């Protein structure tokens, strides 16, 4: 047993892993976990949503995009990656209706570029973070054996990559692991992004003394998941052979209304502001997943409560400070675009 543990540790220390989106929220946490395991980590990120200061000092940072296939060819040839963790994406379900070309270029074509190089360079396993968005408006709790029915371009792109990984495995033998996380929050989240990550939006608004903005009546439900319950399992998944060529929901079990989230966030921040209700947008009203498959394979016993997770994130947010909410500059369709998204 002891010799087996030593052997596995040596294997990890020799592993070379590429993490796309490693300067972003989930990616930075996955990088930290891989560094702990002894991986040599190369981070590829275009800094469109992440920050260089998020990158672990023991990882090597390369600024660039997954849409740059020439750059990818050079990186794969130079480093001979054992594992690819693909977390780079522009994850804004609601906005994806209005930026279809951008969405498919970055979230689908960029992913295919990585898959191509992984096949050519015999990568041992390709770990992909998909999304609960692939389920669309299916009745919760969503299960992995349900047939996905995405309702926005972001979910469509994620599901297309999932299908491509399956066919690539069948054709070329590339192993993969797919995770479908949902509503993840925590340290390193870009709280200045006005289009996604409602927890970060709320905290940024509170620090500025602004009302919290909620689309619709706030009764829509989500299971908000703390990053510390998600990233370690994504990082360690390549060491679990039973996980290969499987799809996993991962995240919290208990769902909350957005109204409830607003109150718990104000409690965690110790700041109270009024709520500004906006016209409802086109979104799935209720979304949470069944996690029994992940719990069995990854031996998940407990998850962080919403109150505890938000308290940790609130402390981090206050230290990090307010971030300016930039407008997305390349809106392709303006019809039905929520006006709040264009406010200065």
Image (cartoon, grey):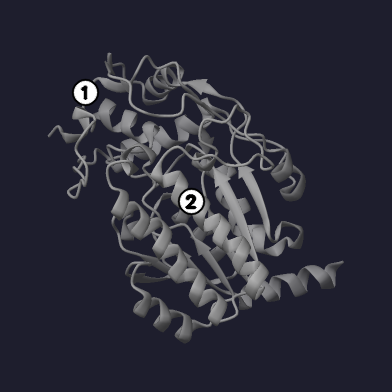
Q: Quarter of the image containing the N terminus? A: bottom right
Q: Residues within 10 Å of mark 2 (few under 14, many from 20)?
A: many
How far from the left and from the top, in percent, is residue 283? 40, 29
How far from the left and from the top, in percent, is residue 200? 35, 35
How far from the left and from the top, in percent, is residue 102? 29, 54
In this orientation, does residue 42 appear? no
Q: Residues within 10 Å of mark 1 (few under 14, many from 20)?
A: few
In this orientation, does residue 51 appear? yes
Which picture quadrant has residue 207? top left
* Observer-nearest of 326 and 114: 114
Which residue sits at x=56%, y=76%? 119
User: From the viewer's perspective, is residue 339 above or below residue 322?
Assistant: above
In the image: residue 300, left or right of residue 287? right
User: From the viewer's perspective, is residue 277 above or below residue 171?
Assistant: above
Which picture quadrant has residue 56? bottom left
Q: Read off the residue under disc 1.
A: 209
Which residue sits at x=39%, y=61%? 55
How far from the left and from the top, in percent, is residue 224? 51, 32
Q: Read off the residue under disc 2.
A: 158
Q: Quarter of the image containing the C terminus? A: top left
Q: Residue furthest right?
A: 1
Q: Earlier in the sequence, mark 2 or mark 1?
A: 2
* Observer-nearest of 108 and 343: 108
Circle 2 — which element? helix
Q: How many marks?
A: 2
* Observer-nearest of 135 and 30: 135
Gap between marks 2 and 1 measured at Cα: 36 Å
Which residue sits at x=63%, y=58%? 177
Q: Residue furthest bottom?
A: 78
Circle 1 — which element? loop
């Amino acid at each position: 047993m002891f010799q087996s543990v030593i052997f596995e540790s040596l294997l990890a220390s020799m592993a070379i892993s590429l993490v796309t989106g490693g300067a972003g929220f989930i990616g930075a946490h996955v990088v930290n976990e891989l560094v702990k395991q002894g991986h040599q980590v190369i981070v590829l990120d275009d800094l469109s949503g992440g920050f260089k200061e998020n990158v672990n000092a023991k990882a090597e940072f390369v600024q660039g995009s997954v849409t740059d296939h020439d750059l990818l060819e050079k990186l794969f040839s130079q480093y001979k990656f054992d594992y690819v963790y693909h977390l780079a994406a522009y994850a804004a379900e609601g906005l994806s209706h209005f930026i279809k070309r951008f969405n498919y270029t970055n979230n689908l074509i960029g992913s295919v570029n990585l898959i191509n190089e992984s096949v050519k360079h015999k990568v041992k396993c390709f770990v992909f973070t998909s999304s609960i968005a692939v389920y669309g408006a299916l009745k919760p709790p969503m299960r992995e054996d349900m047939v996905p029915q995405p309702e926005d371009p972001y979910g469509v792109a994620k599901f297309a990559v999932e299908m491509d990984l399956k066919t690539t495995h069948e054709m070329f033998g590339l192993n993969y692991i797919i995770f479908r996380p949902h509503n993840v929050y925590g340290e390193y989240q870009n709280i200045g992004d006005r289009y996604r990550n409602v927890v970060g939006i709320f905290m940024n608004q509170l620090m500025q003394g602004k009302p919290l903005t909620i689309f619709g009546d706030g009764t829509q439900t989500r299971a908000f998941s703390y990053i510390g319950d998600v990233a370690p399992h994504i990082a360690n998944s390549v060491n679990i052979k039973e996980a290969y060529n499987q799809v996993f929901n991962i995240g919290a079990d208990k769902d909350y209304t957005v109204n409830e989230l607003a109150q718990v966030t104000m409690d965690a921040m110790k700041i109270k502001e009024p709520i500004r209700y906006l016209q409802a947008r086109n979104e799935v009203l209720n979304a949470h997943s069944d996690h029994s498959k992940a719990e069995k394979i990854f031996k998940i016993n407990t998850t962080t409560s919403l109150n505890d997770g938000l308290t940790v994130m609130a402390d981090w947010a206050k230290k990090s400070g307010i971030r300016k909410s930039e407008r997305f500059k390349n809106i392709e369709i303006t019809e039905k675009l929520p006006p709040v998204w264009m406010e200065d």
